[in-house]
């Protein structure tokens, strides 16, 4: 299996020395995200997120299926990830990469297990028919921060998606086309977003005798990810409710550092939530030409 080109010893020492002086190689502050862009496709439910040079596309699809036997009153929500070979030389088609199951697992914990999507609203006939919502995450360019970008893409795509309207009469379910009825959106109970903190062991002063200090940065680029000693993933919503905390790597993280990470994550999550909301409003205005959507969605008085 091809491996990602690792930083040389000179690059490693240069990055660590810069972090020791509170400087990052791309000029960002230690707690700053890279430039973020969010675009939506022509169809509902397609979100294109660009975080620096990292690019992730999420696509939401819906189909009617049979619910799980132990979840008769709930719909189905699944998340799948695909690492495209164009994203990195280490991603090969047909061969799973160690990053793929780890990315899927974190997305499952952050979005599905935190009940971000109201699955009860997806039920059509208890134990017989329900909506199955599927989120396909495609990694097109990998330059670090895959989890953060993927989580933003899935949340934005879910909020942007519109499923066909249905009516239930007895045991008969009728699905209406967009020409017959305006599609309806999904019900999201909250927006959990991931913020990844990377930990670096750098010497406080130059030389071998300097004391080792822990430097924490937000949204590490690929080169920084290859050098870091460990990482902490904090998933929370804009209300400050922590949905998940995952620690990877052997570095020791004390309680005070973890508390500071959650405080920083709350600020970042609130900023990203406002950014997603603004982009959704802009897309809605671009689609609503002449107030047509408002006219179509208005109830007729009879």
Image (cartoon, grey):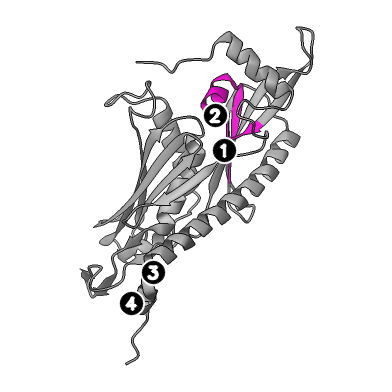
Residue 226 painted magenta? yes
What is the spatial separation of the Cα atoms under label 2 and label 3, in whole angstroms? 37 Å
> Which segment is the magenta one?
217-235
**Left/right of residue 283 with respect to residue 18 in the rendered view:** left
Q: Which residue is mark 3?
A: 288
Q: Nearer the viewer, residue 179 or 108?
A: 179
**Sequence-wise first label, 2 or 4:** 2
Circle 4: is it few (<14), some (14-19), or many (20+) Cα within 10 Å? Answer: few
| The N terminus: image quadrant | top left
For marks 2 and 3, the one nearer the N-term is 2
> Looking at the image, which residue is at 74% across and 23% down?
21
Look at 44% across and 46% down and name the residue there.
153
**Which element type, helix, strand or loop, lies under badge 4?**
helix
What's the mark number on residue 296? 4
Could one spot residue 14 in this view of the protein? Answer: yes
Q: Which residue is mark 2?
A: 221
Crowd class of label 3 (few under 14; some 14 to 19; many from 20; radius 10 Å) = few
Q: Is residue 219 magenta?
A: yes
Residue 18 placement (x, y as % from top left): 69, 21
């Amino acid at each position: 299996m091809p491996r990602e080109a690792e930083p040389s010893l000179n690059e490693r020492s240069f990055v660590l020395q810069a972090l020791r002086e509170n400087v990052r190689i791309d000029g960002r502050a230690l707690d700053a995200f890279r430039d973020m862009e969010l675009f939506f496709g022509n169809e509902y439910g397609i979100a294109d997120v660009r975080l620096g040079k990292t690019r992730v596309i999420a696509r939401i699809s819906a189909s009617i299926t049979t619910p799980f036997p132990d979840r008769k009153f709930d719909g189905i929500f699944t998340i799948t990830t695909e690492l495209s070979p164009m994203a990195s030389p280490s991603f090969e088609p047909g061969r799973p990469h160690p990053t793929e199951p780890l990315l899927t697992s974190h997305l499952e914990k952050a979005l599905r297990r935190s009940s971000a999507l109201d699955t009860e609203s997806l039920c059509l006939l208890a134990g017989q028919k329900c909506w199955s919502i599927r989120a396909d995450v495609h990694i097109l360019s990998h330059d670090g921060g895959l989890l953060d970008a993927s989580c933003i893409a899935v949340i934005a795509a879910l909020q942007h998606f519109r499923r066909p309207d249905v009516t239930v009469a007895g045991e008969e379910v009728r699905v209406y086309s967009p020409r017959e009825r305006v599609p309806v959106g999904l019900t999201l109970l909250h927006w959990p977003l991931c913020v990844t903190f990377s930990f670096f062991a750098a010497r406080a002063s130059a030389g071998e005798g300097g004391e080792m200090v822990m430097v924490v940065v937000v949204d590490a680029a690929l080169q920084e990810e290859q050098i870091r000693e460990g990482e902490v993933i904090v998933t929370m919503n804009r209300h400050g409710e922590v949905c998940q905390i995952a620690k990877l790597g052997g570095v020791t993280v004390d309680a005070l550092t973890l508390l500071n990470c959650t405080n920083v994550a709350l600020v970042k999550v609130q900023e990203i939530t406002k950014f997603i909301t603004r982009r959704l409003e802009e897309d809605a205005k671009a689609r609503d030409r002449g107030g047509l959507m408002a006219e179509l969605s208005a109830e007729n008085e009879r």
